[in-house]
Image (cartoon, rainbow, N blue to C red):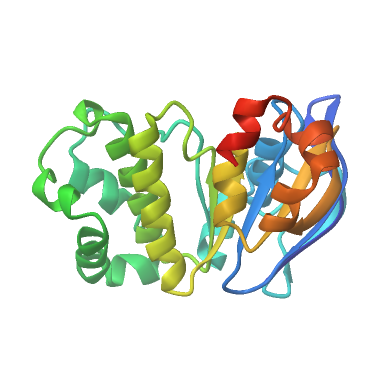
């Protein structure tokens, strides 16, 4: 579904991605993990059309998307749920969800898709008239995911879905992602919560220094001592070992 080859991108004269290669197959959950500042979010923003690549290419469903404007990426079926949720805090929950139905195809099925989102996240139906800014962090994250789903994506990019959330909220968000995965939707998850992401993923890529340095199944990377020590920053203490 998604193929990225030798992708370079950054901000102004500062290059962040130095030749990324990766593939995502239809129906997979793929995690992209690594330390802060290694290019994970930059990669998603480039794929979503928010940053124009300086070199390399990315194809989605066989079509080149490198440099495609963000609205065209959404129309093609590639949708991003940004870091920090980015809801409209002074709009109610329902309006935030409806804004996700950007494309003509999604607008035509808005009510049907809204019903599907409410089935997935029942509390959103209960609070549809509530201002989004008054929701808890975990509830805001699920509202943001719901907004992304309203666009009827084929591939959903999720940036730091657990950032700033309490452990119980993280658990609920990942349970919801499991349900979404069950519908056959393809997911790419960027995470600093490495263990959680690897457990949820079919396959994973570790990024360091703007490049993919290792890849494999989620379980392979969890069990790879060298990967954990060198790239993931886990497995260094007995307490951390026990948590795995």
Q: Position of residue 44 (x, y in %)?
A: 65, 45
Q: Quadrant of residue 28?
A: bottom right
For image coordinates 38% across by 64% down, the residue present is: 179
| Any part of residue 131 in sight | yes
Q: Is residue 137 left or right of residue 215?
A: left
Does residue 124 appear to the left or right of 102 in the view shown?
A: left
Q: Nearer the viewer, residue 53 or 142?
A: 142
Please state which of residues 152 and 203 is positioned toward the viewer in this rendering: 203
As drawn, 157 above or below 12:
below
Task: Tell me if residue 72 comes above or below residue 221 in the rendering.
Answer: below
Quarter occupied by residue 16: top right
The answer to whether residue 138 is left or right of residue 183 is left
- Using the image as rendered, state which of residue 119 and residue 221 is in the foreground: 221
Q: Is residue 126 left or right of residue 210?
A: left
Q: Quadrant of the C terminus?
A: top right
In this view, the residue in front, 220 or 62, is 220
Is 241 located above or below residue 181 in the figure? above
Q: Position of residue 26 (x, y in %)?
A: 61, 74
Residue 162 lies, in percent from the top left, at 47, 36
């Amino acid at each position: 579904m998604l193929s990225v080859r030798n992708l370079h991108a950054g901000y102004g004269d500062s290059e962040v991605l130095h030749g990324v290669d990766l593939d995502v197959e239809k129906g997979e959950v793929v995690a992209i993990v690594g330390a802060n500042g290694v290019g994970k979010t930059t990669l998603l923003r480039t794929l979503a059309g928010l940053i124009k690549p300086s070199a390399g290419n990315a194809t989605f469903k066989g079509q080149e998307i490198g440099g495609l404007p963000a609205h065209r990426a959404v129309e093609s079926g590639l949708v991003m749920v940004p870091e920090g949720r980015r809801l409209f805090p002074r709009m109610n929950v329902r309006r935030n969800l409806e804004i996700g139905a950007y494309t003509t195809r999604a607008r035509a099925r808005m009510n049907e898709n809204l019903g599907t989102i409410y089935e997935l996240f029942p509390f959103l139906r209960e609070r549809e008239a509530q201002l989004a800014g008054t929701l808890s962090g975990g509830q805001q994250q699920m509202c943001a995911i719901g907004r992304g789903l309203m666009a009827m994506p084929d591939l959903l990019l999720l940036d730091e879905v657990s950032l700033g959330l309490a452990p119980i909220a993280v658990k609920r968000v990942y349970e919801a992602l499991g349900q979404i995965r069950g519908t056959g939707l393809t997911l790419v998850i960027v995470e600093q919560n490495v263990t959680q992401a690897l457990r949820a993923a079919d396959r994973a890529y570790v990024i360091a220094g703007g490049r993919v340095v290792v890849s494999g199944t989620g379980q392979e990377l969890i069990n790879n001592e060298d990967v954990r020590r060198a790239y993931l920053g886990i497995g260094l203490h007995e307490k951390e070992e026990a948590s795995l």
